[in-house]
Amino acid sequence: MSDPIVIAYHLIWTAYGWWLPNDIRGSGSTIIRNDIHKKLGELHLGRKQSQPAGWQVRDFYQQASDLLKYPLLTFGPAQVNAIASPFQQVIQQMKYTCYACAIMPDHIHLLIRKHKHLAEEMIGNFETAGRATIAGTGGWARSHPVFTLGGWKVYLDHPDEVWRTIPYIEENPGKIGLPRQQWSFVTPYNNWPLHEGHSPNSPYARRLREYRR
């Protein structure tokens, strides 16, 4: 039996220096490529069931900042707005459909509808555009990396998963006391591909019936 067809991607990547491979909260990395980072501890693949306290995370990154080639990079309000502009351009130029976006001080969340581009290619397009726009601003040297290359993707294969992910992304700023973000490039979700008027014989609808039989 085939799995349901992926309909959207939850894309996540970080500002430079954040969520290192041996982050004490756990990570998606399977290897520490930089020997210097090994001083910070061992790998833990996947998010730890028991999460460390906030002060422990801050202490970890204080130690990390002394080992990184460049200072940890954190986005302030001006950088958040600056990053949003090239994101909008990428969405328009590539004809992506974005259902949610949160540009956090140390990482990015985007929810993008399935497209001919792979999730990794989408992340690369957004990183390249954002880097070109804000490199050399905010008091950073132009040579300072803006994002940690690559990122994570969560595959969503049902509208219920999309509906659950949208508020998760939208509520991220509020969790750290920042105002809710509203972006003109975000399209309200209409339950695609099970939206009103969809064909019950579409490949997705047929696959879903098969999966749930």
Image (cartoon, grey):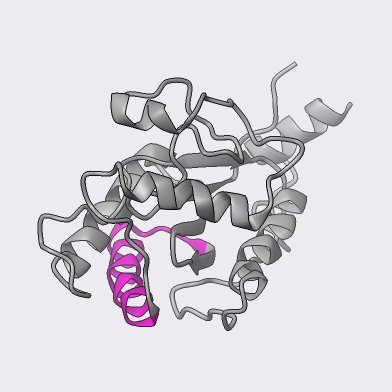
Q: Nearer the viewer, residue 104 or 60?
A: 60
Question: Is residue 82 shown above or below 20?
Answer: below
Point out the image quarter for the C terminus.
Answer: top right
Specify the segment rendered in magenta. Answer: 77-98
Q: Is residue 11 left or right of residue 95?
A: right
Could you say where residue 97 lies in the image, as x and y percent from the top left? 47, 61
Q: Is residue 175 left or right of residue 20?
A: right
Q: Nearer the viewer, residue 143 or 191?
A: 143
Residue 53 among magenta residues: no
Can residue 20 be seen by looking at this rendering? yes
Could you say where residue 59 lies in the image, as x and y percent from the top left? 51, 51
Q: Residue at x 10, y 61 (%)?
A: 142
Q: How many marks?
A: 0
Could you say where residue 138 lies in the image, as x and y percent from the top left? 22, 75
Q: Residue at x 66, y 38 (%)?
A: 204
Point out the image quarter for the N terminus.
Answer: top right
Kindly give the residue lying farthest to the top in the view shown.
Answer: 1
Question: Is residue 192 shown above or below 176?
Answer: above
Residue 84 among magenta residues: yes
Could you say where residue 120 lies in the image, as x and y percent from the top left? 38, 38
Question: Is residue 45 shown above or below 163?
Answer: above
Kindly give the residue lying farthest to the right in the view shown.
Answer: 213
Q: Is residue 103 left or right of residue 83?
A: right
Can residue 113 be seen by looking at this rendering? no
Residue 191 lies in what quarter of the image? bottom right
Dominant secondary structure of the residues highlighted in magenta in the image: helix
Q: Residue at x 38, y 76 (%)?
A: 76
